[in-house]
Amino acid sequence: MRKVLIIIQREYLTRVKRVSFIVTTLLAPIGFIVFMLATVLVTTLSADEKRIAVIDESGVFKETRFPDADNKSLYFSYPESNFDTLFSRLNAEGAEAQYDAILLIPQGFDVLNPNRVGIQLFTADRPGLSMKQFLSKTINDLIRKKKLEVSAIDAEVINNLNEDVRINYTSGLGNEKAGFTEVAAILGYLIGFIIYIALFVYGTMTMKGVMEEKTNRIVEVLVSSVKPFQLMLGKIIGIGAVGLTQFVLWVVLIFLSNLLLGVVLGITIGNNMQPPSGMGMQGEVDLDDVQMIVNHLSEIQFLPLILCFLFFFIGGFLLYGALFAAVGAATSDDGDMQSLTFPISLPIIISALILTNVIGNPGGKLALWASLIPFSSPLIMPALMPFDPPIWQLILSGVFLICGFLFTTWIAARIYRTGILMYGKKVTLKELGKWLFKST
């Protein structure tokens, strides 16, 4: 055991002292700050005012005023000048003209047949997608109201018919509130994605570390002092500890960055976070729903979620790390490494593919079995935690993961002890199968 601890210490300290580790660890909070500042900058720059002159030659909208955009990025004016005069100025002055665009409702326009003589928009520059969507929705809403007036239908009746129904959900768990499912889904996707990336990054790091020592013939010296299994186990745990340390540092640094942005710029991710004002321009996003989702983050039990994340991150890395280490020991050629890595990567990729279905139906059979199978549970079970799965499912998943880790460690150890000292021989899956049942 003492030798394994020495190997763990060596692997850990060697990697955390590298410049690459320090740089990648610091990139997370820096990237977070850049992202938040970029969001503010983009929101500020996108708030460029657009002035639209409305020329109603038909007289249909004579008594109507077009509603400006909520974020004041686009507003309407009703000049006394005629269309020809404004159009000439727009062509002559371009972007420097008094108005950025002219909205013409021509003579003969009929609200009951609005496409027969269509409404036209004249701009100095190409109109953006936001302007097109906003104008389309605004004009369609106004035409709909005019049709109601012409047809002598009470607009209030139509508004009542179109009113959306909000359903109040009550589950047997007693924790279902508005926005809870949406928050749980977002956290589930985020957790699953983080573990998916971590398994590949740190699994590949383990495999490269083994290959490097094998290529440099350092392992020949090491195995004279420790058993191959001890060497493999120490390397896996040491690199896993590096990954865990990096995750903890990322969380702490991002939290501190969030506090710094809150003090300096008043930008934070939390209960006071507001969606960008431009989001509501097209009327497609309910800002109240977005704010409700943000506010209900407090409904999630974060302590069990963090503990589950740590357990399944460590268990998943130990399970897959052993297999990646075995591949690194079995080959010293990049081509062979890629072909042997694919069977190991396939379960991780499949788990990521079924994550969407599992989040959409957390109580389904697919979610149950995917959370129990050791090769998929490191991604699926933590992603299900925001939905409060049954305690028996969580315990059974953890037990199966431990058994899976022991099984893959046994397989990896059989391959590792033979492959670590083999050089120059092309390894096939059939050859690996012989190593598994080779007597010591």
Image (tube, helix red, strand yellow):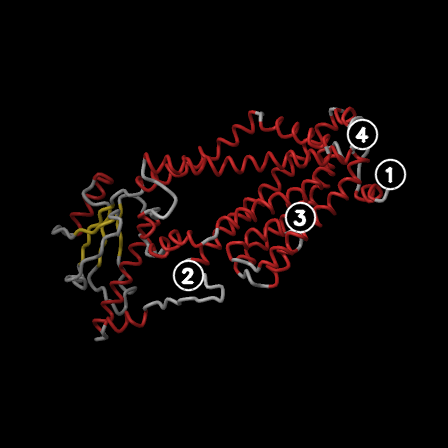
Please tell me which of labels 4 and 3 falls first in the chain: 3
Image height of 196 relative to 175, above or below: above
Name the element at disc 4.
loop
Distance of mark 2 from mark 1, alpha carbons? Answer: 59 Å
Please tell me which of labels 3 and 1 falls first in the chain: 3
Name the element at disc 1.
loop
* Residue tagged 3: 346
Quadrant in the picture for the N terminus: top right
Please tell me which of labels 2 and 3 falls first in the chain: 2
* Residue tagged 2: 177
Furthest residue in direction right, as rendered: 439
User: The residue under label 3 is which amino acid type?
Assistant: Leu
Q: In x, y percent, where is residue 292? A: 37, 55
* Residue tagged 4: 423
* Residue tagged 1: 440
The residue carrying pointer 3 sits among few (fewer than 14), some (14 to 19) or many (20 or more) residues within 10 Å by Cα, namely few
Q: Residue at x 48, y 35 (%)?
A: 28
Quadrant in the picture for the C terminus: top right
Give the number of the mark in front: 1 or 4. Answer: 1
Residue 115 picture quarter: bottom left
Give the number of the mark in front: 3 or 1. Answer: 1
